[in-house]
Image (spheres, rainbow, N blue to C red):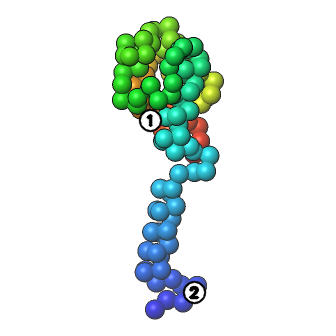
Amino acid sequence: MGSLFHPTESNADLTNQRMDSLSRMPHKSEPSMEALLNELRTKIIDILNLPGITPADIREDDPLVGGPLGIDSIDVLEMVIMVEKDYHIVINNKELGAKVFATLRTLADYIRTHTPEAAS
């Protein structure tokens, strides 16, 4: 059995397990996926001025472009600006934009994995 100053393998394993569980915990500054989806719903309605649309009308797996919201390429440019301004993420080519703005969920996933806070 190891001393306090010379941990046994089992003590080291416990420490590693604790560190692993802490690293999987979301940072306090990271919103939950559901919170981010709801935030994006509200922002999309606001920046695109979608009359008669409520956050509940925007389902996370419906297509954003050409879907039930009627979002077109000009609207996508507005959303690109919002993502750059609000989340500090640059989307600088059409192919990437098509993937990121496929659905609300793909947009939220991209934001969560590419925000400067997520990289640290």
Q: Which residue: 46% across, 84% down?
A: 8
* Residue at the front extreme of this rendering: 52
Q: How many marks?
A: 2
* Left-right relation of 8 to 43: left
x, y percentage for residue 110? Answer: 46, 32
* Left-right relation of 21 to 115: left
Gap between marks 1 and 2 measured at Cα: 43 Å
Give the camera-side residue of 26 and 4: 26
Label 2 sits on residue: 4
Q: Residues within 10 Å of mark 1 (few under 14, many from 20)?
A: some
x, y percentage for residue 91? Answer: 50, 21
Quadrant position of the C terminus in the picture: top right
Give the camera-side residue of 49 and 95: 49
Task: Say whether residue 34 is visible.
Answer: yes
Type of residue at label 1? Asp
Q: Residues within 10 Å of mark 2 (few under 14, many from 20)?
A: few
Q: Could you say whether the residue bearing mark 1 is in a helix, strand or loop? A: helix
* Left-right relation of 21 to 83: left
* Left-right relation of 60 to 78: left
x, y percentage for residue 95? Answer: 39, 17
Q: Which mark is residue 118?
A: none
Give the camera-side residue of 14 and 76: 76
* Residue at the bottom extreme of this rendering: 1
- Whichever of callouts 1 and 2 sits on the residue coming sooner in the sequence is 2
Give the camera-side residue of 95 and 98: 98
Task: Say whether residue 81 is visible.
Answer: no
Determine whether 72 is above or below 118 in the image: above
Type of residue at label 2? Leu
Label 1 sits on residue: 109
Q: Which residue: 47% across, 62% down?
A: 21
